[in-house]
Image (tube, rainbow, N blue to C red):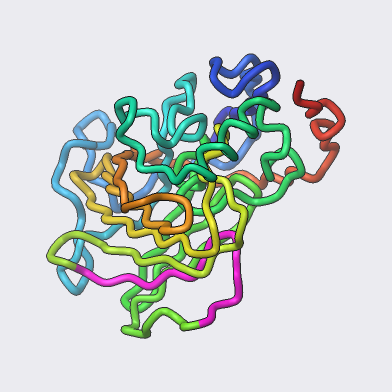
Amino acid sequence: MLRPFKLFLFAASIFVAPVFNQPIFAQWPAVVSKKLPRTADGKVKLGAPAPRNAQNKPDFSGLWEQYGEYDRPKYLIDIAADLKPGELPIQPWAANLLKQRQATNSKDHPGARCLPSGIPEKDAVPAPFKILQMDDLIVILYESRTIFRQIFMDGRPLPKDAEPAWQGYSIGHWEGDILVVDTRGFKDDGWLDMAGHPGTDQLHVVERITRKNVGTLQMEITIDDPKAYSRPWTIRESAHLLADGELIEHICEENNRDPGHMVGK
């Protein structure tokens, strides 16, 4: 397989389109998935009904990505991009922190130091992620930072005092054909996006995920953080299937030259 891996530099400002988009080609053996429906000429029927597993639940397994090859990573730059002015129920102290982060061009964003993205920011990173779906566990392998996330489907409750983690602690259940993922246990002083919308240790994220068809995942993400926001608020994102694709190792720490350039204003 031959696929370009997209790199994005947010140099002058996070509010402008990425100024660097350099394809780096990696060679993988060509593999054609035998589970996907295809036309007579071998193309994947992306609009076909979503596949189902042995329990007759939608099967989310596959390689996914939110953006097209040259799309601007809208929700990574600003998770509240679709909200109208005044709709974001941000607490005054959090609004001030957001302004401070923007005033310094988000130089303290964890990604500048190769630290992981948290949830829900991770959903918006412009890199593929692979879903492995089992009856009692769903695993998401993220190409960005080469990290993983577990969603426990075995009926366990959320821990009362979870060890704070970048990805939090996730449990899931089905509501019809909708996968509902409930996540708590985040680190304090988090970032929801590159703009600097804050998250705290009280952050509670609920993702409602559906597979519209073979080629499309739809995600409704509700953010409930009473420390930073006066009420829960919801955004909607989607991802498309990368048929016959595969993950590529991504080690951010290797030859990382960004921190010295992240000087703000």
Front-most of residues 193 and 230: 230
Q: Residue at x 66, y 32 (%)?
A: 106
183 relative to 34, above or below: below
Residue 136 as seen in the image, left or right of residue 187: left
Q: What residue is rendered at 19% in x and 45% in y?
A: 212
Front residue of this view, candidates 40 and 135: 135
- Residue visible at 39% across and 34% down? 80
Q: Position of residue 46 (x, y in %)?
A: 23, 37
Residue 152 appears in the picture as rendered = yes
Query: x, y (%) of residue 90?
Result: 42, 43
User: Quadrant where the C terminus lies?
Assistant: top right
Is the residue 81 above or below the residue 31 in the image?
Answer: above
Q: Where is 133 relative to 85, above or below? A: below
Q: Left or right: 252 with respect to 167?
A: right
Read off the magenta span. Answer: 161-174
Which residue is depicted at the point 25% across and 62% down? Answer: 179
Report the label total.
0
Asked if residue 173 lies in the magenta stretch, the reply is yes
Which residue, as the protein is rendered here, is positioned at the far front? Answer: 92
Write down the quadrant of residue 37 in the picture: top left
Above or below residue 105? Residue 208 is below
Image spot of residue 223 (x, y percent): 37, 52
Please indicate, yes or no, whether residue 127 appears anywhere in the rendered image.
Answer: no
On the rendered image, what quadrant is the N terminus found in?
top right
Name the one closer to the observer, 216 or 163.
163
Residue 247 location in percent, x, y?
A: 55, 46
Q: Is residue 129 magenta?
A: no
